[in-house]
Amino acid sequence: MAGELSPIDKAKFVAAKRAAQFVEDGMRVGLGTGSTAAWLVRCLGEMVRDDGLRIKGVPTSTRTAQLAREVGIEVISLDEAKWLDLTIDGADEFDGELNLIKGGGGALLQEKIVATASDQMVVIADIGKEVETLGAFPLPIEVIPFGWQTTQALVEETLISMDVLGRSSTLRMNGDIPFITDEGNYIMDLHLNRIGNARQLSLVLNQMPGVVENGLFIDICDAVVIGFGDGRVEVRDINAGTIDRDRMDFVETDNLFSDLTD
Ligand code: 5RP
């Protein structure tokens, strides 16, 4: 129940609940991945069940697809949708220009494809994700398994000429074996500490043959819904230049707060 949630989970929940208000009847909606996005999917499921909301959801991972189906959201592929009205997703970091680091959950590739195919991307996050400069959170990049150590060496060498503070990288593991993405690739986490020029870094990383995509989302996010542990939310719209403040109730329904797995 909401009363037993940690402040950070309450913040994630209220951000998700507020962002669900962006979703309108008939929309094709990109559904993000991660614990904050899972709250959103549950909120939307409740709106589908209780309010008769009709939406088609395009999930950004098999995890999200499973949850969306469980809560009663109609799931379609991106190719079936072709274009989306809105994508709502979490983030690992966001800065003042709403540039993001994503991929903490290993779904950055599908997340970036889906967000880029949307009229609007709204990020949902607790206030702890806001940063002055991106890079304290390790930057995930998705790499092809073939020759991954050679790709790693090339990435680390290239970082020497980039405006970053750290250059080490680690292969993400799932126990004793490499973490495998939904696309069958590996994730490498770059420990950069501070990224001085995120746009340049993103372009350079994506030039490397073994790198499929990186977790920097530049000029993709339109608005962020920031949640606080006491129920306050702040909606920052980068295009309109507006900041709206609100407060959300914790509505304790068994459907929303039971058997959370993400
Ligand atoms: C998954 C992501 C997530 O959005 C990001 O890791 C945030 O996750 P959480 O909401 O659990 O903090 O990019 O690839």
Image (spheres, rainbow, N blue to C red):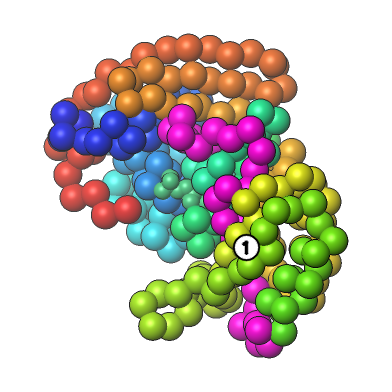
Identify whether 158 is placed above or below 110.
below
Query: Residue 31 versus residue 54: which sits nearer the camera?
Result: 31
Q: Which residues are magenta?
A: 121-149
At label 1, which amino acid type do we have?
Leu
Most extreme residue toward the bottom is 147
- Residue 99 is covered by the magenta coloring: no
Measured as percent of width and height from the top left, residue 252 is found at 17, 28
Q: Residue at x 50, y 27 (%)?
A: 225
**Taking 131 as reference, is 175 left or right?**
left
Q: Residue at x 24, y 49 (%)?
A: 260
Measured as percent of width and height from the top left, residue 24 is found at 49, 27
Q: Residue at x 74, y 38 (%)?
A: 219
Q: Residue at x 73, y 71 (%)?
A: 156
Q: Secondary structure at mark 1?
A: strand
- Residue 146 is covered by the magenta coloring: yes
Identify whether 215 is placed above or below 158.
above
